[in-house]
Image (tube, rainbow, N blue to C red):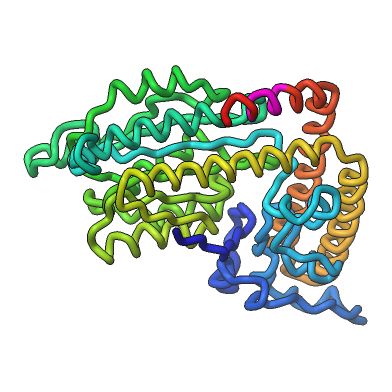
């Protein structure tokens, strides 16, 4: 089992700048930290400097650029407010309005191969996915869906174009319902090619970029892209635009080293988990680990919703970050040619504000029923043991 720790998440900004954006994927140690600008006597006649790349780096996806968090003596890699309120294990948690999990399942012809003596890889995968959904917390904040690729046409050259051109959302995003997922999976047979890039790209239709939303993708595949796509590039694009929070990858019966490395790269660039399962037991173990991770995310969310000091912490840090952004806007306003940078800084400020508003909505929506949610989840835990 391989866990990838690196995660870099630039803000979803659309304005292009003359300065290079190569720093968008840098870690906090590599990021260029902007200088605090001194006042100039004739600032209005001076050309505004380009907005540096550090304004794009936001590892913990809280809307606040990493260097601003560093200036405020915060760790940009984790949500320190939630750690203080709920403990170290909550470091990856989010006070999210929606926690979405999309499972992307390989249904290419090779998945019809045996995983052991009796079952095909496809059958093992279907059972594990159904079990995963069965074990998910049943709460309105949790959503799950299943997409499949490779089930169209067959894996002959004559059918490649048809097979590579289609993916299908077989179970729409909704509150976890194992019977719905089981019925949807029953309609899928392993027959065709592997358009992994197209499937990841299509996930954006069902996991829209929204503030205060966690979009988790689990990719199950027994090989790499076979339809001339570039899944690593597509995954990076969705990650950088907040459509995807992380992609965990389960490689099932991977034989070639280059295949494993290609799948691992998808997980690595999104800070996800890569698991290589060579048999049924390891595959089941992988999904057990993913299930545990889902419950940890949910438990952190439960704690966050019920913590009054947590909201106070968020409000204080948002105010500090907004003040820092406004100082930069003021500096740019005093120089000529700063309009483009100011427009982007306003987007940064708006994102901080929207994130804070989203957190307040979560608490307003769920706190009144928090005791019932906890009771239901505890009952479910007991039944699943």
Q: From the image, which quarter does the C terminus lie in?
A: top right
Residue 283 position in % (x across, y down): 38, 45
- Left or right, 256 with reference to 244: left
Q: Residue at x 34, y 37 (%)?
A: 125
**Front-lying residue, 117 or 191:** 117
> Where, by quadrant of the figure, is residue 50 drawn?
bottom right
Q: Is residue 65 magenta?
A: no
Q: Residue at x 26, y 40 (%)?
A: 121
Q: Which residues are magenta?
A: 376-381
Q: How many marks?
A: 0
Q: From the image, which quarter does the N terminus lie in?
A: bottom left
Q: Main secondary structure of the magenta part?
A: helix
**Front-lying residue, 196 or 91:** 91
Q: Residue at x 47, y 22 (%)?
A: 178
Vertical arrangement, residue 366 with respect to residue 78, above or below: above
> Where, by quadrant of the figure, is residue 334 drawn?
bottom right
Residue 100 position in % (x across, y down): 57, 35
Residue 318 position in % (x across, y down): 85, 52
Residue 14 position in % (x across, y down): 59, 54
Q: Residue at x 68, y 61 (%)?
A: 340
Vertical arrangement, residue 49 with respect to residue 176, above or below: below
Q: Is residue 380 magenta?
A: yes
**Front-lying residue, 229 or 219:** 219
- Left or right, 206 with reference to 165: right
Vertical arrangement, residue 223 with respect to residue 105, above or below: below
- Left or right, 252 with reference to 384: left
């Amino acid at each position: 089992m391989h866990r990838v720790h690196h995660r870099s998440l630039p803000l979803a900004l659309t304005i292009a700048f003359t300065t290079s954006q190569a720093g968008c994927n840098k870690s906090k140690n590599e990021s260029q930290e902007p200088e605090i600008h001194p006042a100039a006597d004739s600032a209005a006649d001076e050309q505004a400097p380009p907005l540096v790349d550090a304004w794009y780096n936001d590892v913990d996806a809280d809307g606040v650029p990493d260097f601003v968090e560093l200036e405020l003596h915060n760790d940009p890699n984790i949500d320190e407010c939630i750690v203080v309120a709920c403990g170290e294990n909550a470091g990856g948690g989010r006070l999210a309005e929606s926690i979405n999990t999309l499972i992307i399942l390989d249904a290419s012809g090779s998945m019809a191969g045996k995983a052991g003596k009796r079952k095909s890889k496809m059958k093992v995968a279907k059972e594990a996915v159904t079990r995963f959904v069965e074990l998910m917390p049943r709460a309105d904040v949790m959503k799950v869906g299943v997409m499949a690729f490779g089930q169209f046409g067959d894996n002959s050259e004559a059918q490649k174009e048809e097979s590579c051109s289609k993916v299908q959302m077989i179970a729409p995003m909704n509150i976890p319902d194992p019977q719905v997922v089981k019925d949807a999976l029953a309609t899928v047979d392993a027959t065709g090619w592997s358009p992994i890039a197209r499937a990841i790209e299509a996930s954006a239709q069902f996991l829209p970029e929204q503030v205060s939303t966690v979009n988790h993708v689990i990719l199950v595949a027994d090989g790499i892209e076979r339809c001339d796509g570039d899944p690593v590039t597509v995954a990076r694009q969705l990650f950088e635009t907040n459509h995807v929070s992380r992609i965990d990858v389960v490689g099932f019966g991977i034989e070639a080293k280059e295949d494993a490395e290609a799948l691992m790269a998808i997980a690595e660039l999104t800070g996800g988990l890569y698991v290589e399962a060579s048999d049924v037991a390891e595959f089941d173990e992988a999904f057990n680990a993913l299930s545990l991770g889902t419950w940890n995310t949910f438990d952190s969310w439960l704690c966050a919703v019920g913590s009054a000091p947590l909201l106070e912490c968020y409000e204080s840090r948002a105010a500090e970050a907004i003040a820092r952004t406004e100082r930069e806007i003021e500096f740019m306003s005093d120089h000529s040619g700063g309009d483009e940078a100011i427009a982007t800084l306003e987007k940064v400020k708006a994102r901080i504000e929207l994130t804070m508003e989203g957190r307040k909505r979560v608490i307003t929506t769920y706190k009144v029923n928090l005791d019932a949610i906890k009771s239901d989840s505890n009952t479910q835990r007991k039944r699943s043991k």
